[in-house]
Amino acid sequence: MENKNIETATLAAGCFWCVEAVFDDLKGVESVESGYSGGHTENPTYREVCSETTGHAEVVQIKFNPNEISFKEVLQVFFTVHDPTTLNRQGNDIGSSYRSAIFYNSDEQKKTAEEVIKEVEAEAIYSDPIVTEVTAFDKFYIAEGYHQEYFTNNPNQPYCAAVVAPKVAKFRQKFVSRLKKSS
């Protein structure tokens, strides 16, 4: 078996169901787990995070093979599948747990994140400034089991049908050449 040098990206872009569903389809991504980062409460529950008392954001922790996809490419997808200009909000999901954030794992990831933000701002894709926080990674707490692969397991759930499915479709259309398989 080939020894792969796997890297980790920890990203917050609103509801983790949406973000997990997108990155699950991306070539070079080995695994995606939904969870919580960026707060002060040890082992938070979903209910606690939603209460806005823990300081955590809903995040996905992405394990990827840098020989197949770079951290920069991961971030390019990240900035396409959410609105990085809304502070503590993605659509109707409101609160600091839905903030846009990159929790970097190395100085190189921090530098890359800052460069990509500058590139996205220079492209003037968004009329408002990017508010994505770039913060050192501290801890990741995996979300409850029912949150893992939520969209895959619940595609007809109303939130998934109305919010997740359109984001996944937009991603698949824009990044068709980067998909793991035909979708």
Image (tube, grey):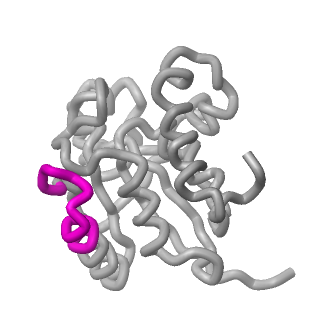
Q: Where the N terminus falls, by quadrant? A: bottom right
For residue 125, above or below residue 119: above
Q: Is residue 165 left or right of residue 140?
A: right
Which residue is rendered at x = 41% and y = 31% of the image?
45
Side of 94 where 168 appears, left or right: right
Does 127 lie within the magenta span? yes
Q: Position of residue 94 (x, y in %)?
A: 24, 28
Who is closer to the viewer here, 35 or 119?
A: 119
How far across and down, in percent of the image, does residue 150 sit?
60, 32
Q: Between residues 164 and 30, which one lies in front from this camera angle?
A: 164
**Residue 51: x and y, percent?**
26, 25
In the rendering, at what x and y percent does residue 142 appear? 51, 45
Residue 95's quadrant in the figure? top left
Magenta-highlighted residues? 117-130
**Residue at image location 22% in from the left, 53% down from the top:** 126
Left/right placement of residue 148 relative to residue 1 reads left
Label total for image: 0
Query: Between residues 64 and 138, which one lies in front from this camera angle?
Result: 64
Q: Residue 153 appears in which quarter of the rendering?
A: top right
- Is 55 on the left or on the right of 181, as rendered? left
Q: Residue at x 47, y 50 (%)?
A: 60
- Viewer-closest of 21 and 76: 76
Indicate the quadrant containing the C terminus: top left, top right, bottom left or bottom right: top right
Residue 151 part of the magenta segment? no
Q: Residue at x 41, y 29 (%)?
A: 46
Q: Is residue 124 above or below residue 55?
A: below
